[in-house]
Amino acid sequence: MADSLRRLVRAESGRVLQEKLENWYRNYEFNSCDQNLNRCCEILELSSEIQGQLFAILNETSREGGQYAGVETIKTRLLPRLTPCFSCSSGRIFETTLTEDLTEKERQLRELASNQNVQLQELRKELTSTRLKLNRVQQDLKLSRAQEKDAQKKLDRLNDYEHQIQMLKDKISSLGAERSFHQSRLAQRRSPSPRHRENKSLSPFPLRSHSPGRARRTNASRRACLITRFSDIYDHRRLDAETFLKAYISDVEMVHRIIYTAAVESFHAAKMAYRQFKLRVTETLSLSHTGPESLEDTVLDYIVDHEDLYDVQASVNEVIRSMNINPKISFPSETDFIVISALIRELCHVAFSMQTLVPPLDVAFGIDGELFSETKYHRSFDSDFTAALVAYHVWPALMENDIVIVKGEAVTKRGALWSCRSRSRNTNRSRSCSRSRSTSPLLAHHLSRSRNPSPLRNRCPSKWA
């Protein structure tokens, strides 16, 4: 017994147990739940080892005392403590309370899992109903689109019918005017009185009332269509041209300047072509015009009906010539501005048609370094929104007299005026070095093309000479 007790004293298990208890007490508030449970289990294991050794010493001591030695002590001191929760010599613990806690936790987990399954089923039902609603909405949308297409087709046919009816009315009115004119002349010839002859010499033509032409009656619808086409060019054709130019030019600012210059020059070339075309048509129709519409309305109707006679290729060539001598833009020597001829052609078509409106539409005049106008332009996404001056323009604004119809786009930066001056000097030097290059074969072939003369030129060659 003395040896077992000596070994227990030398092992210092009680001191280790005390140190573990103190260490656990100091760190209890900082440990997590798992860490505290681990500390408690370690102390229980150590205490069970100490209890096992003490029970061994107790057994040896009772043997040394004889058969009935220490019976009263064991009955009064040891047996009352031998309860189901007391540790036995083997170190095992009856964990009745822990088992009840585990059972409660498992029950809560099962309830939580069942609740989650119920919620998941409800969410699935809601998702299914939402998908059904979405399918119904999509079907309704398809049906509405189909109805819209049918309505648009009917509207187009109705517009065609109205146009044909108006043409027939115009023809009937012109035939009625000619009929009344011929009847009056026939009556004057049959009348023998001098007074009637005098009246004949004074009023050879019947009075006519001038009515607005077809172009003026369709001015509002044509204006809306042209504004939509101009916006579509900005949204699609311009971006396509930017993507194509970026394959040759790495400077994004130069790409924007080229497209803006192309737009402005296209409107200028289309306006010049419209003036010349209108002058030739006026000279031709003035020789045979009889009414009932005014000569100006007749000329405008003819131009609107025969816009296909507009020599758009000549305007495209003129725009490219103007861009080649513009000091603010430049292009690599291996290619030419002919690569964006599709954009220029579309702009020329729209600009020419806009000149037939009353009043006509035109693009706004803009210069680098001007004061930014919120009513004319949108700021580009890479602009300095605190700057007041325009560094360069991306797209022109569409104007009707002095009223902005469609806003343009501009880039604002601080110190825009000085940067514009330095860029202008650098561009002039670079263009003076590249002016010696010859015109590309593609451009030479494009500039050499010419359209067939219009029917007006064939009818009156002296007027078009």
Image (cartoon, rainbow, N blue to C red):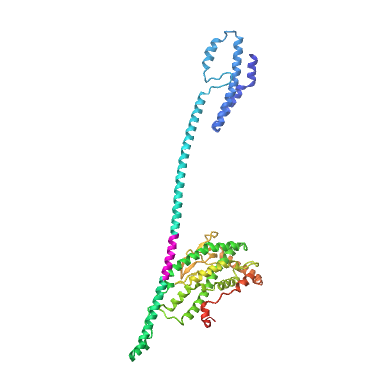
Seen in the image, is 201 located left or right of residue 375?
Answer: left
Rendered residue at 52%/19% (across/down)? 84
Q: Nearer the viewer, residue 451 or 192?
A: 192
Could you tell me residue 444's position as x and y percent? 63, 72
* Magenta stretch: dominant secondary structure: helix
Q: Is residue 162 magenta?
A: yes
* Residue 399 appears in the picture as rendered: yes
Could you tell me residue 95's position as x and y percent? 53, 23
3 w.r.t. 161: above or below: above
* Residue 413 appears in the picture as rendered: no
Could you tell me residue 278's position as x and y percent? 49, 77
Could you tell me residue 205's position as x and y percent? 38, 84
**Residue 56, image quadrant:** top right
The span shown in magenta is 149-164
Rendered residue at 37%/81% (across/down)? 180
Question: Can you say which quadrant of the picture contains the N terminus?
Answer: top right
